[in-house]
Structure formats: structure tokens, C-alpha cells
Image (cartoon, helix red, strand yellow):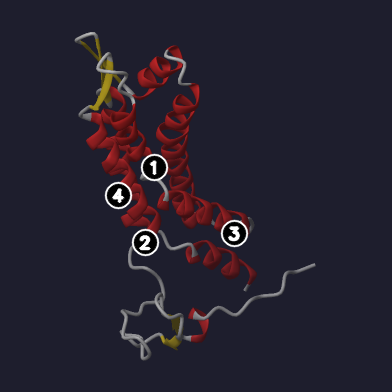
Amino acid sequence: MRPVARNRAISQHLSCCHVCYKLAPVESHHCPRCGAGLHPRKPESTQRTLALLITATLLYIPANIFPIMITEQFGNALPSTILGGVILLIDLGSIPIAAVIFIASVMVPVGKLISLYYLCWCAHRQDEFGARSRSVMYRITEFVGKWSMVDVFVVSILVALVSLGGVISIRPGIAAIAFAGVVLVTMVAADSFDPRLLWDREETAEE
């Protein structure tokens, strides 16, 4: 059975305001209700998103190569990368903290990068199926991005808490700056991507 074509706002020469969601003629440059800038699709959405993703990927390299925290024990400084810090915390018996760092500092950033790269690729594919599931993927990625500063907060909390009477202390390393950059850039990348491009492909195929 042939799917029923949906009428898009853009095909009706209408644009939706990103602030108050009022529909207005596509020729309008500002929302008649709230005055926000009006455009049918985010300008150069995939190009901006890809540029930000490449930047985040480049920042993620030094974030893993350089030490993200430095452990001082009995006067000896021991620099640790992200994975090295996870292994160290496991050896110290802090398995819950190690799990939080691994999830927040490895799984979440890599997952966000892969998801956004995939969505940008899908926005250019001539694929008329799967827009709904990809929209769900985008919403999950955007939601996770809003809480990504947990990655940086983990190191800050460790600096404040992991101090056993001066025997062991932890301070942030240079990789923490690069990692904070990864978090911020991926958040901006998720906001730059326009998920309506996924539906444009599907609805164009249906028409």
C-alpha cells in the first residue's frame, strides 16, 4: 500500500518559529509574535554540525592522550589518562566512581559523536524510511548533551573528595581542558543539527 503523503509547512510556504512555534509566511524574516529570527530550516545545518563534530573529534584526541588527572601519593605524582584513571580507581577499590568516569568520559562522548555523524549522513541519503527512529536518536543525543557537563564535574568532585589525610590527592590535568571543549562543542553541534531534514527526505519520497 502506498503511504499517504503528508503536507509539510514548508510546502505550504510556511515557517515555524523556533521560540514560540507560531506559523508565519516563509517570506517573513522575523516572527510576527515574538520577533525571533525566522527561517524554514536552520541555515547550513549539516555543514555547521559536521564542522563542529570534526572539531570535537580533534579535541577528543588530546583529551585521551594527555593526563586528565594527576594522583599524588606519598609525594609521588602519577599522571593518568581517562582510561588510566579508570584502572587506577578500580585498583583503589572505587569501582562505582570508575564506572561513572568510564560511562561519562568514554561511552557518552563517543556515542554522541557517532550518533551525530550518522544523522548528518542520513540527512543527505535518499532514504525514505527510518526518519522516526532517527528523530528519537536525535532527541536522546540532545538530551544526553544537556547533561554532558557531568563528565567535567566528575573530575572536579574527585579533586574535592579523593583526599585521604594528605596520603592521596587528585588534581586535574591538561586533558580536562580539552575534554571540556569536547563537551561544549558537541552540545553546540547537537543544537546546530536540524532534525526536520530527516523528514524532508521521507516526505519528498512520499510525494
Residue 45 is labelled as 2
Task: Identify the residue position indicated by label 3 in the image.
Answer: 131
Res 158 quadrant in image: top left
Question: Which amino acid, by three-letter code, is at mark 2?
Answer: Ser
Counting from the top left corner in percent of width and height, residue 121 is at 46, 50
**Where, quadrant-wise, is the N terminus in this rendering?**
bottom right
Question: Which amino acid, by three-letter code, is at mark 4?
Answer: Ala
Mark in front: 2 vs 1: 1
Contact flag, marks 4 and 2 (Cβ < 8 Å): no
Question: Which amino acid, by three-letter code, is at mark 1?
Answer: Val
Q: Which comes before the other along the chain, label 4 or label 2?
A: 2
Task: Identify the residue position indicated by label 1 in the image.
Answer: 150
Cα–Cα gap, marks 1 and 4: 24 Å
**Helix, strand or loop under label 1:** helix
Mark 1 closeness class: few <14, some 14–19, many ≥20 residues within 10 Å: some
Cα–Cα gap, marks 1 and 3: 30 Å
**Helix, strand or loop under label 2:** helix
Cα–Cα gap, marks 3 and 2: 17 Å
Q: Which comes before the other along the chain, label 4 or label 3?
A: 4
Counting from the top left corner in percent of width and height, residue 55 is at 27, 43
Report the residue at 41% width, 18% height from top: 89
Mark 2 closeness class: few <14, some 14–19, many ≥20 residues within 10 Å: some
Between 190 and 43, the residue placed more toward the observer is: 190
Q: Which comes before the other along the chain, label 1 or label 4?
A: 4
Residue 82 is labelled as none
Counting from the top left corner in percent of width and height, residue 70 is at 25, 20
Task: Identify the residue position indicated by label 4 in the image.
Answer: 51
Cα–Cα gap, marks 2 and 1: 27 Å
Question: Which amino acid, by three-letter code, is at mark 3?
Answer: Ala
